[in-house]
Structure formats: C-alpha cells, structure tokens
Image (cartoon, rainbow, N blue to C red):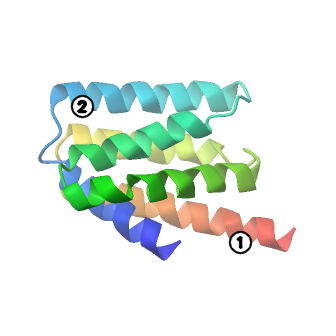
Amino acid sequence: KRFRAIVGTTNCRNCCPKATDKDIEELQRLCSEVEHMIINGENYSERDVEFHTKIASVTGNSVVEQIIPLIAQGVSIYVDLTNHELAGTAVITHQKVVDAIRNHDSDAAYEAMKAHMKENRENLELLKKK
C-alpha cells in the first residue's frame, strides 16, 4: 500500500511539467470513461489501470516504466477487493488529479493523488471491518 502511494504521488508530481495537451486529453478521456463505467455499474478496473499507467508513462522515467505492471496490479486488486462498492469517490479524486496536471501544478497533483491513495486505504480498512 505504502509503495503504491509513494510511487503514485511522485508520478503525479513528475508528470505535471512534462504533460502535453495530448497527454492531458488522454487522461481526461480515461477519467471520463472511468466515471461513466462506475455510474453504469460496469467493471472499470482496466480503464483505471490505464489512467494510472498513463500518468506513470508521462513521467518519462525508465525506472517507473519498469514498475508499471506493479502499479497496474495494485489498481486491479483494489478494484476487485472493493467489488466496485466504494468507487464513487475515485471519480472526484481522479478529476482533481487531471485538473492539477492540466494546470501543470505539481503540488496540487501530488496532493490530489495523496488524497486518492488515502481514500483507498480508508476504504480497504472499512472492508476489513465488515
């Protein structure tokens, strides 16, 4: 959990100065597709993985690119564990991440992803108590 949080927040921060208009369009498309799928009760895991993978790839960091499969696995496991029950908040935090990247605001992107990861941890804790 902590590894994914550290990598995710750092990726967001490092993505901001490098994101092109095309990258931002792609992130927005993926964010919107995840939202649509969640609203319709569809399995959004693959799109969510694509969203996080896109952020990682925009960093241009070859080490990050090597660990993309770990990031993807973490996202998929989370979605499967939560059975999509706790997905609604992801829509909000994903959009905050995209907005920060669009504004090339590294600090805001970092904080938005940090909030997303915190929510994920809290959701997993809620599931453990059920």
Judged left or right of residue 39, residue 22 is left
Q: Nearer the viewer, residue 107 or 16?
A: 16
Q: Label 1 belongs to which residue?
A: 125
User: Helix, strand, or loop for circle 1?
Assistant: helix
Q: Residue furthest right?
A: 130
Q: Label 2 belongs to which residue?
A: 23
Judged left or right of residue 80, residue 100 is left
Q: Residue furthest left?
A: 17
Q: Residue at x 45, y 33 (%)?
A: 31
Q: Residue at x 37, y 29 (%)?
A: 28
Query: Residue 96 at x, y = what percent?
Result: 38, 45
User: Quarter of the image containing the C terminus?
Assistant: bottom right
Query: Residue 25 at x, y = what percent?
Result: 29, 25
Q: Amino acid at mark 1?
A: Glu
Judged left or right of residue 127, residue 87 is left
Q: Which image quadrant is residue 43 in?
A: top right
For mark 2, does the 10 Å Cα neighbourhood hold few (<14), some (14 to 19), or many (20 or more) residues?
some
Please report whichever mark, 1 or 2, sits nearer to the chain's N-terminal start: 2
Q: Nearer the viewer, residue 39 or 66?
A: 66
